[in-house]
Image: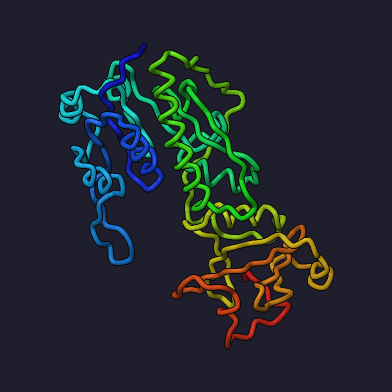
Amino acid sequence: MVAINRIAFMGTPEFALPSLKALLDSGENVVCVVTQPDRPRGRGRKVMAPPVKELALAASLPVLQPERIRGEEFHGILRDFKPDIIVLVAFGKILPSSIITLPPLGTINVHGSLLPRYRGAAPIQWALVNGEEETGVTVMQMDEGIDTGDILLQESIAIMPQDTAGTLSAKLAELGGKTLVRALDLLRSDSIQPLQQDDARASYAPILQKEDGVVDWSQPAKRISGLIRGLDPWPATVTTLAGRRLRLFSPQVEENRSCCSTFPEPGTICRADRNGLLVTTGNGCLLIREVQPEGARRMEVAAFISGRLVEPGTLLGR
């Protein structure tokens, strides 16, 4: 039997909440929570606490918010909590080896992909962008590489046609919490055989930038659909209509491609009605059901075209 009595938890955003909650609900002894400092957020730039901090305080857990995680000052504070293991879920900074190896059992991480696929900061988004039909979570033993440590446990789920980065992230976060608790139980009973990752099968998921969301209408409809869903809610895909920015949401690849023969140029609106904007692409047509005009809220296309004439033949992205 492996003794895991004291757990230090490191995490910051919404994705980490189900894992911390799962630890608490299963009766684990979380001795401290490490999260990012409070930061300005939103349009008003109001200073707000990270979601993990709010849950930790509600559970009366000690919260550490170091500006720097490298250096003896923070290491000494963390060491004083005497953790047997560190659990890391979307903390937001790369850990130095001195923290990874600080507890006797090291540090384990909950990652939102089936490693070695999609190592990096945005695995959920890139799985959608690339049109994957399956993804999952991996609980891994951390080393000094970027998501390169031995695999302890994996669970997979299907990606639904309507999934966005937001909805898929919520599903994987819940799955991650359940898988984490199961992995800890298996570690205690010495029932896990760590599996070394096959680097030859690795792929990478770098953090997305706003420019990644500019739509190239010459791409196939399926690829553009994946881009829109993968970048929803942030940074969102964008095109232009009559010279003004237009963010795009809720895509649907249309089986009926009759509009493509009437308007062959990619990026042409061939229909605008209460069902959405039907747009030609490099291969097939794409129905856009929600948009966000520049300076306005996200809305259904029915509301967008109310009082606004959008003629068939109008080109997007010009």
Instruction: Identify which residue, 295 or 155, lies in the foreground.
Output: 155
Instruction: Identify which residue, 69 or 85, lies in the foreground.
Output: 85
Whether residue 113 sits left or right of residue 223 in the image: it is: left
Residue ID at (50%, 25%): 153
Report the number of numbered marks: 0
Residue ID at (65%, 78%): 274
Q: Is residue 311 above or below residue 277?
A: below
Most extreme residue toward the bottom is 307
Q: Quadrant of residue 256?
A: bottom right
Q: Position of residue 24 (x, y in %)?
A: 31, 36
Q: Quadrant of the N terminus?
A: top left
Res. 13 visible in picture: yes
Res. 142 visible in picture: no
Whether residue 189 sits left or right of residue 212 in the image: it is: left
Q: Position of residue 59 (x, y in %)?
A: 23, 42
Instruction: Identify which residue, 134 or 315, lies in the foreground.
Output: 134
Q: Position of residue 47 (x, y in %)?
A: 23, 57
Q: Is residue 6 above or below residue 203?
A: above
Residue ID at (27%, 20%): 84
Q: Is residue 54 above or below residue 11?
A: below
Q: Quadrant of the C terminus?
A: bottom right
Q: Position of residue 290 (x, y in %)?
A: 57, 69
Residue ID at (31%, 49%): 51
* Colour convention of the picture: rainbow
